[in-house]
Amino acid sequence: MAKFTNNFSPVSNIIVLFLINYSSAEYSLLDSSLCGPSDIEFIENSIIPMPIVFPNPVDWKFKANLKRQIDGPIKSNLTIVRVLSGLQLPIRCYLTNGQWVGSCVYPDLCNSIMYVTNLNKDNCPSNFVANGIDCQCPFNIPSGIIELKDVIQTYSPAFLTNSWLLNGDYKIKIEAYDSRGFFFCLSLGFTIKS
Ligand SMILES: *[C@@H]1O[C@H](CO)[C@@H](O)[C@H](O)[C@H]1NC(C)=O
């Protein structure tokens, strides 16, 4: 009769743990892809540096073709998964500093972007204004090419205290709707180090 033995010594268990940890993908580029038929085409969507070293500034370049106008609030369903040592840890929706954060259905993606970036009509970057975005919600953006650069040099103080923004790889799915209906489904993947 075959005898089942566990041949793993403590040393090889450490090696196995190391390999599991090593296998967790660290992103060297922002992973950005559409996850369904969308009224937007991404030409560029990059964040430098990657991994993001939180809370250091990031250089975000965004160029897209809007196939139609964005009208009014962009209702968005975010699903956020943190991947740590190969384990998928779904981030729930919770309230912090009076703001809902995490995997929530947000009434307007515009408010979320302004909250994270700490932008408002008084510090709105000139290249936003040139693209018809005055940093006031909701967005009303005409169709066509939209190109934003070098914008996230600051984070809102409340965002900096979010406890889930820890080291790890993140996968985010955004399903967005405006007043005309479904707008886009976007999958993002990135790494944060602090
Ligand atoms: C949000 O997205 C998740 C994952 O795709 C899905 O399970 C959930 O039903 C969605 N919620 C709404 C309100 O659309």
Image (cartoon, grey):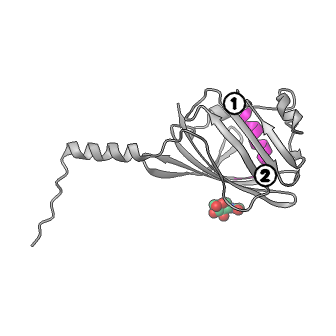
| The magenta segment | 105-117
Magenta stretch: dominant secondary structure: helix
**For numbered disc 2, what is the local secondary structure?**
loop
Q: Which mark is residue 9?
A: none
Pointer 2 residue Cβ closer than 8 Å to ligand 1: no
x and y percentages locating residue 28 in the rendered image: 54, 38
Using the rendered view, name the quadrant where residue 10 is placed.
top left
Horizontal placement of 179 versus 162: left or right? right
Q: Earlier in the sequence, mark 2 or mark 1?
A: 2
Q: Amino acid at mark 2?
A: Pro
Give the numbered dot on residue 107: 2
Indicate left or right for 120 with 57 as reference: right
Task: Residue at 87% x, 31% y: name it.
Answer: 121
The residue drawn where x is 18% and y is 57% is 6
Q: Looking at the image, in which quadrant does ligand 1 appear?
A: bottom right
Whether residue 107 appears in magenta in the rendering, the answer is yes
x%, y% of residue 108?
Answer: 79, 49
Q: Secondary structure at mark 1?
A: loop
Q: Is residue 124 visible?
A: no
Residue most extreme to the front? 43
* Residue 56 to residue 46: above or below: above
Residue 66 seen in this snapshot: yes
The numbered disc on residue 155 is: 1
Q: Residue at x 51, y 37 (%)?
A: 167
Q: Residue at x 11, y 69 (%)?
A: 2
User: Residue 5, located in which quarter of the rendered image?
Assistant: bottom left
Crowding at label 2, few (<14), some or many (≥20) Cα neighbours within 10 Å? some
Q: Give the residue at the far bottom of this rendering.
A: 1
Q: Examine the rendered structure and indicate whether residue 35 appears above or below residue 158.
A: below
